[in-house]
Image (cartoon, grey):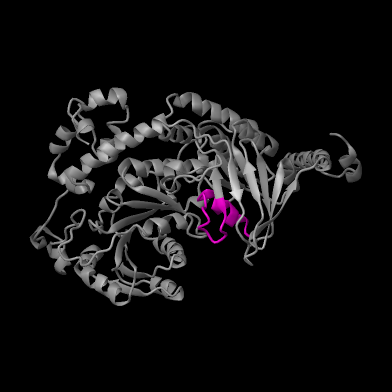
Amino acid sequence: MNETASIPLDTLSQTHPYAKEFFLAIGLKDVAGHLTAKQLVSGLTDDFVEDCGLDRTQMLQHFTVFIQKMNDLRNAPQKQIDSLSIIGGRNKNGEKEDIILTLRPGDIVCVVGPTGSGKSRLLADIECLAQKDTPTGRQILVNHSIPDNEKRFSIEHKLVAQLSQNMNFVMDLTVAEFIAMHAESRMISDVEETVQRIIACANDLSGESFDRSTPVTQLSGGQSRALMIADTALLSPLPIVVIDEIENAGIDRKRALDLLVKEDKIVLMSTHDPILALMGDRRIVIKNGGIDAIVETDHQERENLKELQLIDMHMSDLRNRIRSGRRIDFDMKEYFNSTL
Amino acid sequence: MTRLVTIAGPPSSGKTSVLLKAIDHLKTRGLKAGVIKFDCTVTYDDLAYEKNGIPVKIGLSGALCPDHFFISNVEECLEWGEERGVDILIIESAGLCNRCAPHIKDALAICVIDNLSGVNTPKKIGPMLKLADIVVITKGDIVSQAEREIFTFRVKQVNPRAAIVSINGVTGQGAHDLGVLLETASSLDSLTGQRLRFSMPAATCAYCLGQTKIGKEYQRGYVKKMKW
């Protein structure tokens, strides 16, 4: 451990730009870069050490691990997986789920079934990379092999990003500050470029555009969802995205899914919305805690999806009319038969 | 022999919910857990544990710093666990100030904090977070993915050594991971001679002894003044 702690911080910063961050994070106001971590720590006042809640030895231990972990984080390539396989376990009656389902980047799979049937349990099994050790007895393979036990339980190796209708932004930051903070936590070098790219992308998905100085807590439901999806697609390192419904207002859901697919995410979506469901490649039907069937989206369904999208366009056009104070006093049957 | 775990975290961060879910996992592994909950004035958490058939004992510190009260009673806690045949004894403490330092050197140490507490909170919490072996982050189900990732990063900055586990206290998602980590706690014969990981907040002034009047002449013992 002593090597990193014996190099002057300015020198160390050349290869590890975050080196001084550690001392700022534990409460030091400025960091004298000509000192080594050891020298710096031995020069701290007892009062500072007491307030910081780490003694000098603990501080140096933390510092060494910090440098190592941040370095790993910076050098970690975007997490890529080639496949994710779900090997069936059993349902609530103990009956065997006779199934092996393999998902690949760019796949969209919907999870359907009544409330309480076990949809969340399936998503949780994927989240924790179950190895026949959860109540369902399912097993999850990554790239056709069993993930290392050590990897399963460390947050660095988690694979699943989550998006749900219940999620809100809670930070008191503008859109630009918010994305910048996320980019910094990912050790991205060109923060400003990332910020611009994500805002442009979110505005492309959102019905009403917003700018970089809007506080994230003031975004509308659709804008928030658009920003969350753009950020998850472009900035989150996680290769699997689990979505719990996407509301049908203020966001172009087709483009949102296309974006995730383009970024090579595996998308699992819990939804009963016919348009979203038919946008998926297949549907996992959950019944009584188990996977009851897999329904592949067929040709007829894809054709029907076009019809449904047309109806959806009409509904959104009607919504805009209401928004702009107009009446809806014309013939509805004729309107829905029109191509807009 | 009983394995010992200390768990601490700010009020309402979700300690009890997280434990209830993680103990479910221990049950499926045939392990018996017991809980001792330390708090200041009143607690209802014992009801939640009892309802789930988990042996529970409450320690209320009243006017004392709950940390000091806890550490002065901890040996008896372990004996209580042994007597009840508990495999894993979990001592939950209130974490009422950010300077709490309840973790013991050879006992598995957990800190629970929530995503809603703000991105600067990890920096503000002392030994309770910085010297924990496991940091559990809760309430991720109501904030965005980006905020979860930022918060996790901030925790990693101040405690790079810890294993970080994200748990949804409502659905229990993630609790399985914590359950597996709880099993790694080591057994202790006795706590006599064991050490705290960091000194507890000092409390030896006149006000500790019941003084209520304000003014220099009433200040006795360990008095610290602000810098102006």
Judging depth in this view, the residue of B85 and B178 nearest the camera is B85
Quadrant for the C terminus of chain A, please: top right
Residue at 31 percent across and 43 percent down: it is B158
> In the rendered view, would you say A225 is above or below B38?
above
Q: Is residue B41 visible?
A: yes
Residue at 57 percent across and 37 percent down: it is A227
Quadrant for the N terminus of chain A, please: top left
Magenta stretch containing residue A128, yes or no? yes
Magenta stretch containing residue A38, yes or no? no
> In the rendered view, would you say B199 is above or below A168?
below
Rendered location of residue B153, percent (x, y): 39, 40
Rendered location of residue A19, percent (x, y): 28, 31
Residue A84 falls left or right of residue A38: right
Residue B71 falls left or right of residue A166: left
Rendered location of residue A128, percent (x, y): 50, 51
**Highlighted range, magenta:** A118-139
Rendered location of residue A291, percent (x, y): 66, 56
> In the rendered view, would you say A139 is above or below B86?
above
Q: Is residue A207 visible?
A: no
Residue at 37 percent across and 59 percent down: it is B182
For the image, the number of numbered tags is 0
Judging depth in this view, the residue of A69 and A28 nearest the camera is A69
Q: In terms of image quadrants, where is residue B181?
A: bottom left
Q: In terms of image quadrants, where is residue B12?
A: bottom left
Residue A174 falls left or right of residue B222: right
Judging depth in this view, the residue of B186 and B170 nearest the camera is B186
